[in-house]
């Protein structure tokens, strides 16, 4: 198998220099003195080399004529097939001279190298956030433009990033092969499982580079970042509290209306938000890996253990804006705050 794959890759390298004869009918050749002598009739685009013309042709035809004989995946360009072959051989010919990490392509090595230099040459002209890669800037820019170029084939819902579409598509297939070992919650993507696991460990690896507030999930950081870049706000008609996102306003309004749209499948207890339901669901799970080192009481959630610790320390970090009364949990503060509205 390995010898066969190596033979295929060698053949591909040799074959990269071969011209595609059927394309020549679409090329108008000028004089040798011309700077760009290869012209594509369909769009009028001119090129200095025939190889560049051949690459451009694929943007029009989208033809995937090069097939991997191991997994049958198809590609428009032979070079992309050659790079793909390395995923079967695990060949990584490009090595970082700082940390010795290996990469399949030179471009991947260049991208990685910027993590050492902290170079971020691509800057957003709206909010000035800078990026090491141009494609990351393009993805970020869609936050401002609300552009959604990736659409679901099933329901036509649009997304700003391909990864978001992949996550969404799993809602149609219902596939969730990744399980949390602490609470058994299933996930469609391994990355989502890793993010979820931080809820149990109480880690917050994503920090805002503007105000340095940290978050357990990247999506929460992205939402928070809009508070620095977006001028539009949404205000609660009841208490005038201001929100950056309309979904957060809607969730907040349920605190006033006492609407509880999310119900537990096990005990039918209802909650005003999905996050509260998720936290409650852990109470039905037998595993409680977080134990108090004072009284040995155990908890399924790290946040609950932190709240419990305050019963020992008598710490009350939450203060009422109206009467300055102190509380050990945010939940108790919210409950108290309603007494001022009666």
Image (cartoon, helix red, strand yellow):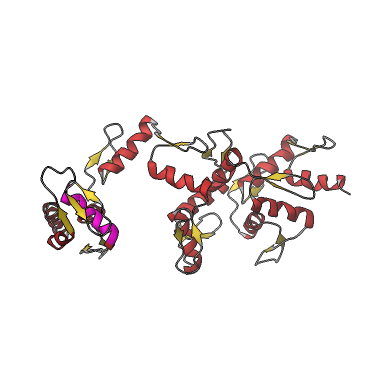
- In which quadrant of the rendered view does residue 190 lie? bottom left
| Magenta stretch encompasses residue 232 | no
Task: Work out whether 74 lies above or below 229.
Answer: below
Task: Work out whether 90 lies above or below 133.
Answer: below
- In which quadrant of the rendered view does residue 262 lie? bottom right
**Does the magenta stretch mainly form a helix, a strand or a loop?**
helix
Residue drawn where x is 77% and y is 50% of the image: 237
- In which quadrant of the rendered view does residue 4 lie? bottom left
Q: Left of 155 or right of it: where is 50? A: left
Q: Position of residue 255 (x, y in %)?
A: 76, 53
Q: Position of residue 253 (x, y in %)?
A: 74, 53
In-front residue for pair 138/173: 138
Q: Left of 61 or right of it: where is 291? A: right
Residue drawn where x is 17% and y is 42% of the image: 35
Task: Work out whether 111 lies above or below 37.
Answer: above
Q: Position of residue 111 (x, y in %)?
A: 34, 39
Q: Left of 97 or right of it: where is 342? A: right
Report the magenta residues as a range.
49-60
């Amino acid at each position: 198998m390995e010898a066969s794959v190596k033979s295929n890759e060698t053949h591909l390298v040799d074959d990269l220099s071969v011209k595609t004869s059927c394309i020549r009918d679409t090329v108008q050749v000028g004089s040798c003195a011309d700077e760009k002598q290869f012209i594509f009739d369909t769009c009028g685009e001119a090129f200095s080399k025939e190889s560049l013309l051949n690459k451009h042709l694929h943007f029009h035809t989208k033809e995937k004529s090069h097939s991997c004989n191991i997994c049958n995946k198809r590609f428009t360009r032979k070079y992309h097939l050659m790079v793909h072959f390395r995923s079967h051989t695990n060949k990584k010919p490009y090595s970082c001279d700082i940390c010795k990490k290996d990469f399949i392509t030179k471009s991947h090595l260049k991208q990685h190298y910027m993590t050492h230099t902290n170079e971020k040459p691509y800057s957003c002209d709206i909010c000035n956030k800078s990026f090491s890669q141009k494609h990351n800037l393009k993805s970020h820019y869609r936050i401002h433009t609300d552009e959604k170029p990736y659409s679901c084939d099933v329901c036509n819902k649009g997304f700003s990033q391909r990864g978001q579409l992949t996550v969404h598509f799993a809602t149609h297939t219902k596939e969730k092969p990744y399980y949390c070992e602490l609470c058994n919650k299933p996930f469609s993507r391994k990355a989502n499982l890793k993010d979820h696991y931080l809820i149990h460990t109480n880690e917050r690896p994503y920090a805002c580079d503007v105000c340095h507030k940290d978050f357990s999930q990247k999506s929460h950081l992205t939402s928070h970042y809009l508070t620095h870049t977006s001028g539009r706000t949404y205000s609660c008609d009841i208490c005038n509290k201001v929100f950056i996102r309309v979904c957060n306003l809607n969730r907040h309004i349920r605190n006033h209306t006492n609407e509880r749209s999310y119900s537990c499948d096990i005990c039918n207890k209802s909650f005003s938000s999905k996050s509260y339901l998720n936290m409650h669901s852990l109470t039905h799970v037998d595993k409680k890996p977080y134990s108090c080192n004072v009284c040995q009481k155990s908890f399924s959630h790290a946040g609950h253990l932190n709240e419990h610790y305050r019963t020992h320390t008598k710490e009350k970090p939450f203060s009422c804006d109206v009467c300055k009364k102190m509380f050990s949990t945010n939940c108790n503060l919210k409950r108290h705050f309603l007494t001022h509205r009666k």
